[in-house]
Amino acid sequence: MKIICIGRNYSEHAKELGNAIPDKPVIFMKPDTAVLKGNDFYIPEFSNDVHYELEIVVKISKGGKYIQKEAANKHYEEIGLGIDFTARDLQSDLKSKGLPWELAKGFDGSAVVGNFFRKENFDLKNLQFSLLKNKEKVQHGNSKDMMFKIDDIIAFVSQYFTLRVGDLIFTGTPEGVGKVYENDILEAYLEEEKALDIRIL
């Protein structure tokens, strides 16, 4: 199972981190060992600045290669929410040296995957999602603000990687990312549906 992630897919998030707006999807990956087991996330000892990044997640239900945008919607049936935990201090150091991000993005437990829901129950072009930290809303996004929509992403990614059933695509985070601390409680909602909740330790 691959975890394919899209960076800088919301312009306001790119701006808040001082990044350029991309003209095509920015891709990075997480290993399957990054998926958090259970509901407790332990801040890793190698970082003092772990950030939450809430994202819409797509689960691939039909494999393919060179998938056309017009056919992309046939390759997934469910969507959900996930958190791309990022060791921002480590990422900043790696970026400054021109090195890949995997150590900051792919560590154990860095991919929180919540409940999945049938896509036909939502308007994918106007899909609201939000993250609460200790009951306070800290992130709010809408799929209409994606620079690269879900079907665009699937078509682009499948030019390079064969997609297989069970692969996950994290589609990018909106503005509002921030640091987590011990004893924080994070809850995420897809429209009115609660998709995940975790505790920070």
Image (spheres, rainbow, N blue to C red):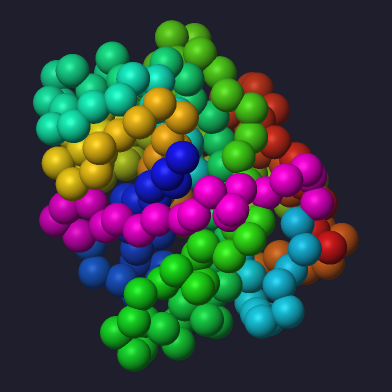
Residue 184 percent across, percent down from the top left: 81, 58
Vertical placement of residue 149 versus 161, above or below: above
Residue 152 percent across, percent down from the top left: 21, 35
Residue 134 percent across, percent down from the top left: 81, 51
The residue sitting at 14% across, 41% down in the picture is 159
Kindly indicate the quadrant of the structure image that contains residue 34: bottom right
The residue sitting at 52% across, 81% down in the picture is 90
Start-end of magenta stretch = 22-40
Residue 79 percent across, percent down from the top left: 48, 25
**Residue closer to the observer: 69 or 137:** 69
Q: Quadrant of the C terminus?
A: bottom right
State the residue lying farthest toward the right.
Answer: 183
Kindly indicate the quadrant of the structure image that contains residue 126: top left
Q: How many marks?
A: 0
Vertical placement of residue 26 versus 55, above or below: below
Kindly indicate the quadrant of the structure image that contains residue 46: bottom right
